[in-house]
Image (cartoon, rainbow, N blue to C red):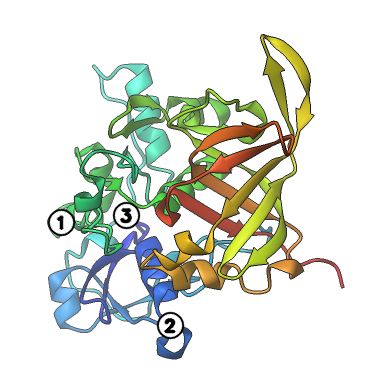
Amino acid sequence: MTTITHAFCLELDRIVTVDEARFEFLSLSAAKRNRFNYLCTNLDCRQAGVRVFGVNDHRPLEDTEVYKDPHFRKSRDTHAPGCPWETEAITPIQGDDEPEEEFLQRAAKAKISDFIERFTPPSAKGAKDQAGNGDGKDVSSVTSQPPNSRNPGERHNEPGMRSTTVLDRLVTSYRQALKRLSSEELRSLQLQVVGVGRMRLVDYFKAIRYCSLETDQRVIFGGARFIHRFGKGVKFEFYDKLKHYKEGVEIGRYPVTLYISPRLVEAARHRNYFEEILKEPEKRRYFTIYALGHLTFSDKHESFSLVVDDLKSLSLLRGPDKEP
């Protein structure tokens, strides 16, 4: 059967992706959290009360072997005739006049449950409005609601159907691609980044060990250890060190830190989401950080800093617990 990528959330009163639901759930205060309830997006199914279940929609993302990516799961309820989520997933077949490159990309997209084709970074012009005037709602998911009359598997070819303003959702899509695709398939995937242009998905994500002070408009990522909480703020240090040059000559390799100030956390509407991720951070072996930011170097402290302007530009994944 076709993988369910969207469901109607009763508490939010709208159709959502599982990542959007997780983001909204964890943004609630702990006292107000009760698991969300979902119905099938198909209108006939919804009117009949056909349920859909969320898996890991109530937990922060984790970078562990036992953790399953958030997803929707069918219930035993019977769907209405013609429900698009009940159709058989169709294996892509190359058309007679379809170029090999286009077919490879289409086939690769079909293996990702919620592949993102268009991303609007928080820094892009108009991004605040596209993100719901700062309320955190992924408005683009509304345009990607599954039409009742179509097989959801066909939506990969429809323009604008897989766009997002939420970095977490893009990161999940990227990580699924790494797990499920061959190297050739992965290199075939294209991403449209508003304000930047069209590029290969793998080129938009850059491991921090390959970054420099010139790295710009890329998702910088890497493993890091927790250093200290500063009230609501936090500091991490990446495991990879970076080379520093003066006048073209390498003068050494220096650590890279990420500092999120209390002011930055307090200014975020979804600060509860951030706090949930950082619950007892000292018990985690590491965190995996994805950030839309830039690097600076301090001669005084002999270190690099990864700087982000707001929490929308940051995606944190918790690593496994430390050994007892």
Residue at the spot of label 3: 88
Going from the N terminus, do you reach mark 3 or mark 1 first? 3
Whether residue 151 is visible to the viewer of this picture, yes or no, is no
Residue 136 lies, in percent from the top left, at 31, 62
- Quarter of the image for residue 40 reads bottom left
- Quarter of the image for residue 253 reads top right
Question: Label 3 is placed on what type of residue?
Answer: Glu
Q: Is residue 120 left or right of residue 252?
A: left
Q: Residue at x 42, y 31 (%)?
A: 217
* Residue that protrudes farthest toward the bottom in the picture: 31
Q: Which secondary structure lies at badge 2?
A: loop
Could you tell me if the residues under marks 3 and 1 are in contact, i.e. CB atoms within 8 Å? Answer: no
* Residue that protrudes farthest toward the right in the picture: 324
Question: Label 2 is placed on what type of residue?
Answer: Ser
Q: Which secondary structure lies at badge 3?
A: loop
What is the CA distance from the residue labelled 1 to the residue labelled 2?
34 Å
Question: Label 1 is placed on what type of residue?
Answer: Pro
Q: Residue at x 59, y 49 (%)?
A: 289
Residue 29, which numbered label? Answer: 2
* Residue that protrudes farthest toward the front in the picture: 300
Residue 237 lies, in percent from the top left, at 71, 48
Between circles 2 and 3, the one closer to the viewer is 2
